[in-house]
Image (cartoon, rainbow, N blue to C red):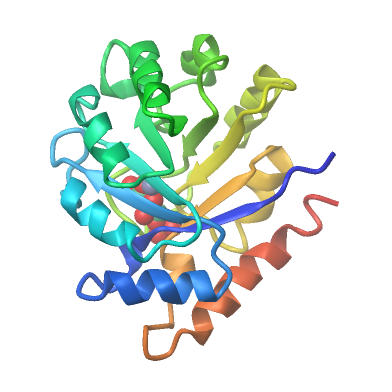
Amino acid sequence: MRRPLIIAPSILSADFADFGREIEAVEAHGADWVHVDVMDGHFVPNLTFGPPAVAAFRKHVTTVMDVHLMIAPVDPYIEAYAEAGADVITAHVEAGPHSHRTLQAIRATGKKAGIALNPGTPAEAVKPLLDLAELVCVMTVNPGFGGQRFLDMTDKIRALRAMIGDRPVQIEIDGGVTPETAPLVVAAGADVLVAGSAVFKGGSVQNPAPYGANIRAIRDSVLQARA
Ligand code: DX5
Ligand code: ZN
């Protein structure tokens, strides 16, 4: 059976003074999920959203709020982001020595549990976690900023797809996804495509039509890859 393809715009590329309307605009123009990048200025060299900001976004999300935690330590904050209304909570396998415990803690909140891998981390790092994770996020940039150049991780994606087998685990790709790179990762086995700059470019809350065209361009680009 063909798995559904999910497009998750990252609001890291939205207008930071207008998140509510930006979320509504991308949802109205074809977003399946809304991806929220949480950064702590320690695990990654940038700072973004605490739990109150994420709770404020939640009021505008009618699809799925996909919260990507680029923070270390991560365990002390899982409950706060669950309470803020995340539907998916993804932590990094590099964020600490106890990723298994981290996934248990996410599952205990009742949210979908994700584990992310930096470009320098091999697929094998999450092998023991695949009975616990519901999503594996493969970073195709070094995390911290939007708009970076795509790093080819297709071998890692293929290895993960084989490791996952028939377990109900989604593979998410995050970083540098465009209509040019999307077919490569989808052919390798990706289910969820995060895209920031490629979705928000050329549009605005006042002129959201480009968001729809950009999302459609990514979707159309992978039709062949999934055929
Ligand atoms: C990077 C973030 C990504 C980023 C993607 O640290 O995790 O979600 O916003 O942005 P683009 O699609 O512009 O690479
Ligand atoms: Zn992200």
What residue is at 49 percent from the left and 35 percent from the top?
138
Can residue 98 be seen here? The reply is yes
Q: Using residue 182 as the reference point, say whether residue 174 is left or right of it.
A: left
Q: Using residue 123 as the reference point, say whether residue 185 is left or right of it.
A: right
Q: Position of residue 76 (x, y in %)?
A: 18, 25
Q: Position of residue 87 (x, y in %)?
A: 43, 43
Quarter location, residue 142: top left
Q: Using residue 227 as the reference point, say whether residue 215 is left or right of it.
A: left
Q: Nearer the viewer, residue 34 or 56?
A: 56
What residue is at 72 percent from the left and 67 percent from the top?
220
Can residue 152 be seen here? The reply is no
Please tell me whether residue 96 is drawn above or below residue 67 in the rendered image: above
What residue is at 36 percent from the left and 28 percent from the top?
109
Q: Position of residue 218 (x, y in %)?
A: 63, 64
Q: Nearer the viewer, residue 146 or 168?
A: 168
Residue farthest along the bottom direction in this orientation:
206
Q: Nearer the viewer, residue 126 or 52?
A: 52
What residue is at 39 percent from the left and 36 percent from the top?
89
Q: Position of residue 71 (x, y in %)?
A: 22, 34
Please tell me whether residue 143 is drawn above or below residue 97 in the rendered image: below
Q: Quadrant of the N terminus?
A: top right
Marks counted in the figure total 0
